Image (cartoon, coloured by chain):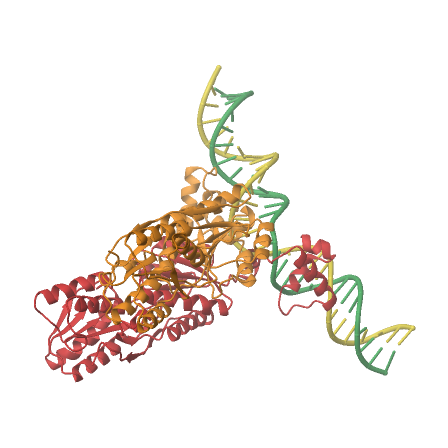
Chain colours: A red, B orange, C green, D yellow
DNA sequence: AAAGTTTTTGCATACGTATGCAAAAATCCA
DNA sequence: TGGATTTTTGCATACGTATGCAAAAACTTT
């Protein structure tokens, strides 16, 4: 190729200059680098991948990009992956279940792993990927029947802790606003929260939300208009809790005096002065680290693993 | 290769089956597809690119992912690019100026175009890309000295329109909170807004923000504590305006009665019931379409173009 | 059925790189 | 200095695909 010709060496030598650890004399290395610089030559990652069988690409499929939580997740993922030398092939998906077509996209480009945040996979896609030896990790989703890696917060335990906390504050009228009800996160948070009270014989009012601000706002407003003022509202995520919070404010309910509000995620907005939402912190960095670790683990060994991280409750102004 | 062997055809024929418009008899096509399905074979995009010189990849570099405006932008970009058959190689950058290293990343993978949102490029990177015939479009940034495509809102005109609107409401104490002062968006919005009043001899108080909620909150709070209650605050973006709005509320200033607030972007949150922010709508879809159009244009012809879209003011509850 | 026409197929080569192997060059040692 | 040893280099080949060209096969026409 051009560089080799101008530097008076073979193509192999040029290749070796750009292959860390290969044997090239210092003199020729300099000469080649000089020519390369001049022609602003870059090794072609595609041709390289063809030989090495490594693409250094990771497929990242993300849903629900409206939730600020996932923007933080995206930022951290791309940074950490970059630090490890990976490129990110990004897909934004609309469906709760990732489509075959989107996976094919990843396969065509020979990604070395797939990360799916906030969405599910059908089990036949999972087996298909397993056949192709492409590791997958679900981020913030879990299905015990699915044979693939999964990283999420220990939602059941977290919600249970929140329930304990609420219980200590002598609440009677307790409300839980769900997220999208077909998601594991919403189901688990509901389970952890409601079960605690069920054991104590205290009823919990369940409102079916969808993880959006608007829905939570509407549900809460409706509740107040029915003259039902809860002691506490636990929202399945922060956005939900903020919707509830704003609805309470618009009805001039005092928070936390009349009604307390608790969220889940600890998005940036939750610490905004006017919100100051008490919430459960999901340790994003840790979750991202685990996700990548699981992917890399599958390059050496097969099988799959489920990781649950803990996180912690953070008390702000919306609880007593 | 495997599929060819099992289907009893040559590799060329397999290739033709997966090349739209190539000549294959219906019988063999079916036979090949069947075997392919069975082995879940996918054409290797990398090997294909090596021949065709087309990668169908677009590099997308994004900054300031904390601003919800850019989440919408990201979503729309990935969707529209997918619809056109492109893959997205995503990079999240921390610096206001894209680094050489990040561009190299794109070049290694032979992206067919680069989109940069909310960040700048040095002019020598621009010329380097021009030499390699890689089209670039800046999204929401503009520099008249830079020889590359640029798409943004007509910020000067928009801010000018906002000024006219404000002027009609007989305001005297007028405040503008800037964004990051080295960004073209902030500069242009300031220019369009301030110039209008300069011509009329009305002073505008400039507060130096940084496009974050927190900073705007702090600046506004400080202002009120100095007993200066503005008639109107125009924030360089919505997040800034929301910060100002919350600060006003926390000081129990009535909005819009005592102070009006205007933003720029029209992010989703601006229409939340508790905010209801009057703002300038940036027509994201149109901007994204133009960005892609400019990239594709550069595959046929050289040169570069600057596109300014208009957008419109939307009146909500924070202005009279 | 034979000659002509069209369609389908395989062969060979190219894309830009990595790498085992052997040849060449450089270095070392006595 | 000359042989032994180590380092550097080039050659050839492979990766998985697309494609021009010619051969083969399938149709058409008379």
Q: Is residue B38 above or below residue A28?
A: above
Of residues A150 and B248, the one drawn nearer to the viewer in this rendering: B248
Q: Is residue B2 above or below residue B66?
A: above
Q: Quadrant of residue B208?
A: bottom left
Q: Quadrant of residue B67?
A: bottom left
Outermost left residue = A227
Q: Is residue B14 visible?
A: no
Outermost front residue = B201
- Residue shown at the point (52%, 46%) measured from the top left: B304
Determine whether, in the image, residue A238 is placed left or right of residue B135. Answer: left
Determine whether, in the image, residue A319 is placed left or right of residue A223. Answer: right
Of residues A26 and A162, the one drawn nearer to the viewer in this rendering: A162
Instruction: Measuring from the top left, give residue D10's x and y in whole percent.
Output: 73, 58
Q: Is residue A23 visible?
A: yes
The quarter of the image holding the C terminus of chain A is bottom left
Instruction: Measuring from the top left, give residue A116's x and y in whole percent.
Output: 36, 63
- Residue shown at the point (74%, 66%) measured from the top left: A27
Of residues B184 and A288, the one drawn nearer to the viewer in this rendering: B184
Count of number-bearing discs: 0
Instruction: Measuring from the top left, give residue A22's x and y in whole percent.
Output: 65, 68
Instruction: Measuring from the top left, give residue A198's x and y in whole percent.
Output: 13, 78
């Amino acid at each position: 190729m051009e560089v080799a010709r101008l530097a008076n060496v073979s193509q192999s030598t040029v290749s070796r200059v750009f292959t860390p650890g290969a044997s090239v004399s210092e003199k020729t290395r300099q000469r080649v680098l000089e020519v390369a610089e001049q022609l602003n030559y870059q090794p072609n990652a595609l041709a390289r991948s063809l030989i090495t069988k490594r693409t250094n690409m990771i497929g990242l499929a993300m849903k629900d990009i409206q939730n600020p939580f996932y923007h933080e997740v995206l930022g951290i993922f791309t940074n950490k992956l970059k630090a490890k030398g990976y490129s990110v092939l990004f897909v934004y998906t609309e469906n709760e279940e990732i489509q075959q077509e989107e996976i094919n996209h990843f396969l065509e480009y020979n990604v070395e792993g797939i990360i799916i945040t906030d969405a599910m996979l059908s089990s036949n896609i999972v087996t298909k990927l397993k056949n192709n030896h492409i590791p997958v990790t679900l981020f913030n989703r879990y299905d015990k029947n699915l044979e693939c890696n999964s990283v999420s917060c220990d939602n059941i335990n977290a919600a249970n802790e929140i329930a304990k906390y609420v219980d200590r504050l002598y609440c009677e009228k307790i409300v839980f606003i769900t997220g999208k009800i077909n998601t594991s996160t919403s189901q688990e948070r509901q389970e952890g929260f409601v079960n605690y009270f069920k054991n104590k014989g205290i009823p919990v009012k369940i409102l079916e939300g969808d993880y959006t601000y608007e829905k939570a706002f509407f549900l809460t407003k409706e509740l107040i208009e029915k003259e039902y003022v809860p002691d506490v509202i636990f929202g399945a995520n922060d956005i939900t809790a903020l919707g509830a919070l704003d609805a309470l404010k618009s009805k001039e309910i005092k928070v936390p005096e009349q009604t307390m509000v608790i969220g889940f995620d600890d998005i940036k907005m939750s610490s905004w002065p006017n919100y100051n939402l008490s919430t459960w912190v999901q340790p994003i960095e840790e979750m991202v680290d685990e996700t990548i670790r699981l992917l890399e683990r599958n390059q050496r060994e097969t099988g799959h693993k489920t990781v649950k991280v803990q996180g912690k409750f953070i008390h702000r102004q919306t609880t007593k």
